[in-house]
Image (tube, grey):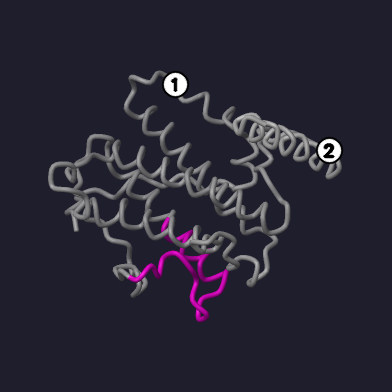
């Protein structure tokens, strides 16, 4: 582990995922000049926190069975997505910067896709707790290091594995946003709940959504017939 001679900077208080997500991008627009490294780090961190909160929020209101239910042929499920992102986050902000997550779960280094689903011995609460621990550890690393702090990603190709905190922040914001989008679709397939309350999803009644979907089906059918020359 890195030899830190000073106490790490205090980590900012956790932000409620409801308030952070509902703020949309408006809460990310006051970060200051982009040439300021501290402002740049703050901006990237806020995007990571926003997408992290959106992902975790997709578990709200789901029972154990629903949270685990695979809705795609490849088994994608909400709880597995939360567990996966927490595991990846722990590695990128931990091992990459020689700041390993304290008391990591035994499965973290396994190669059997254990991070993509919750076992029968794990509960939703267990996975959420692990996600919070991973996030707190990541936030501590972000607070302690400068954007140009070096790290090594041992599972990347040799020519690309030497990185900076800046690179990892961008990577994890992207990774988290990608899986938050997956979770949004999976949740909609489970019980119809969609969007994050941030104004990016139109407000329609169930009947209006059905009419909208029927409209899109009609367009798809007509386009298919046209392409077939019919």
Q: Is residue 168 found left or right of 18 in the rendered image?
A: left
- Tell which of 194 and 166 is nearer to you: 194
**Do labels 1 and 2 touch, CB within 8 Å?**
no
Residue 98: mark: none
- Residue 195 in the image: state x and y as whole percent: 66, 43
Select label 1 or label 2 by which is in front.
Answer: 2
Whether 80 is drawn above or below 142: the answer is below
Q: Residues within 10 Å of mark 1 (few under 14, many from 20)?
A: few
User: Where's residue 179, x and y in %?
Assistant: 49, 49
- The quarter in which the C terminus is drawn is top right
Residue assigned mark 2: 208
Residue 153's place in the image compared with 116, above or below, is: above
Residue furthest toward the left? 158
Report the residue that reaches farthest toward the bottom: 121
- Res 142 → quadrant: top left
Question: Residue 10: x and y, percent?
Answer: 39, 46
Q: Residue at x 34, y 71 (%)?
A: 112
Q: Is residue 159 magenta?
A: no
- Residue at x 83% of width, y 45% of height: 206
- Label 1: element kind: loop
Q: Nearer the viewer, residue 139 or 68?
A: 68
Which of the two labelled residues, at mark 1 and mark 2, occupies the earlier sequence position? 1
- The secondary structure that dominates the magenta segment is helix
Q: Quadrant of residue 115?
A: bottom left
* Residues in magenta, as a range: 112-134
- Residue density around tag 2, few if under 14, some if 14–19, many if 20 or more, within 10 Å: few
Q: CA distance from mark 1 to mark 2?
A: 41 Å
Q: Residue at x 69, y 40 (%)?
A: 197
List the residue tagged with mark 1.
32
Q: Quadrant of residue 77?
A: bottom right
Q: Is residue 193 left or right of residue 52?
A: right
Q: How many marks?
A: 2
């Amino acid at each position: 582990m890195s030899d830190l001679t000073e106490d790490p900077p205090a980590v900012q208080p956790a932000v409620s995922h409801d308030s952070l997500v509902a703020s949309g991008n408006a809460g990310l627009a006051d970060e200051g000049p982009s040439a300021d490294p501290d402002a740049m780090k703050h901006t990237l961190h806020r995007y990571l926190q926003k997408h992290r909160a959106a992902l975790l929020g997709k578990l709200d209101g789901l029972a154990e069975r629903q949270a685990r239910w695979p809705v795609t042929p490849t088994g994608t499920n909400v709880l597995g997505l939360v567990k996966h992102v927490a595991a990846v986050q722990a590695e990128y902000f931990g091992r990459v910067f020689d700041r390993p997550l304290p008391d990591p779960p035994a499965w973290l280094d396994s190669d059997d896709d254990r991070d993509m689903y919750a076992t029968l011995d794990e509960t939703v609460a267990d996975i959420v707790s692990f996600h919070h621990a991973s996030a707190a550890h990541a936030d501590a690393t972000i607070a302690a290091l400068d954007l140009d702090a070096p790290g090594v990603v041992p599972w990347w190709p040799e020519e690309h594995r030497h990185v900076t905190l800046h690179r990892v922040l961008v990577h994890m914001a992207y990774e988290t946003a990608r899986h938050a989008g997956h979770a949004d679709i999976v949740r909609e397939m489970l019980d119809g709940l969609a969007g994050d309350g941030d104004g990016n999803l139109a407000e329609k009644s169930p009947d209006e959504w059905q009419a909208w979907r029927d409209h899109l089906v009609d367009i798809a059918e007509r386009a298919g017939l046209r392409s077939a020359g019919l």
